[in-house]
Amino acid sequence: MLTATASYKIVSENLPRSIDRVADKPDVSRQTEYYLKNIGKAKSIDDFMSDDRLYRYAMKAFGLEDMAYAKAFMRKVLEEGTDKSDSFANSLSDRRYREFAEAFNFQRYGSTTTAFERTQQGTVDKFYRQTLEEDVGAEDEGVRLALYFERKAPTVDSILGLLADPALLKVTQTMLGFSEATGALDIDRQAAMFAKRLDVEDLKDPEKLKKLITRFTSMWEVNRAQPAFSGASILIGGPITMGVSGDLLASIQNLRLGGN
């Protein structure tokens, strides 16, 4: 069995080929064909959300598959868009909702929203990458986390951005040798601890980022070899509660779940 470091290196260094293999899978090909054929027909939020195949494909592409059931919540994300600083998506700490609302910005572009590249092939490319990460995660969650960190970490502008994303937090905790128990500390104290050990600007440097990921996969192997390690799973975009932050849960409670 390959180590997480070796497996990550193989996938990362052969990313285009790895994604091509994902795209050629029959189930992925069928879903993508339907999406590309029909997404341009969605002229409104109602059109988009009423076609469950389109909606769920897009949700998975943006790592939000675990929130697909919360249609009232997602409708609010889409209806308020991102133009106003106090919009619903902008008020959430998880950047994925802003990214989704910006891509499917019916509030700004109306019926032309789904004509843009970002809602068509751009979303398909995200779907392929998300599926690839899920596939490798079935073999080794550490590789999945490493690929996710490689993709998302360069977009983070602050330590708080790392803390707000459960998967980025997990990678950073492991990389720096911090216990998961640190997550229970006051947020400012956590941020101070991380800032002493990590310069966020390093995440934007490809070479430094690779070194950080190698440190993570090495530490992942060490932790996995220890009997006391819980092996608790963090899935990116998977059906787990850990992927849903407290502010999301509080917001969902104020909405009618499953609404159209």
Image (spheres, rainbow, N blue to C red):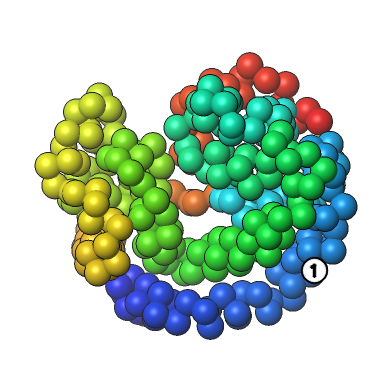
| Amino acid at circle 1 | Glu
Instruction: Pick whichever, 47 or 175, lies toward us.
Output: 47
The residue that appears at 23% across and 56% down in the rendered structure is 202
**Quarter assignment of residue 2:** bottom left
Q: Is residue 188 left or right of residue 6?
A: left
**Quarter assignment of residue 43:** top right
Q: Is residue 73 left or right of residue 154?
A: right
The residue that appears at 35% across and 40% down in the rendered structure is 161
As drawn, the residue found furthest toward the left would be 196
Instruction: Pick whichever, 61 or 3, lies toward us.
Output: 61
Query: From what the image shows, is residue 206 above or below residue 234?
Result: below
As drawn, the residue found furthest toward the top would be 254
Spot occupied by residue 38 in the image (x, y as percentages of width and height)? 85, 58
Query: From what the image shows, is residue 132 above or below residue 199?
Result: below
Spot occupied by residue 112 in the image (x, y as percentages of width and height)? 79, 47
Residue annotated with mark 1: 33
Query: From what the image shows, is residue 72 above or below residue 225?
Result: above
* Disc 1, SS: helix
Instruction: Pick whichever, 230 or 9, lies toward us.
Output: 9
**Quarter assignment of residue 162:** top left
Spot occupied by residue 157 in the image (x, y as percentages of width and height)? 33, 44
Instruction: Categorize mark 1 by other alpha carbons within 10 Å: few (<14), some (14-19), many (20+).
Output: few
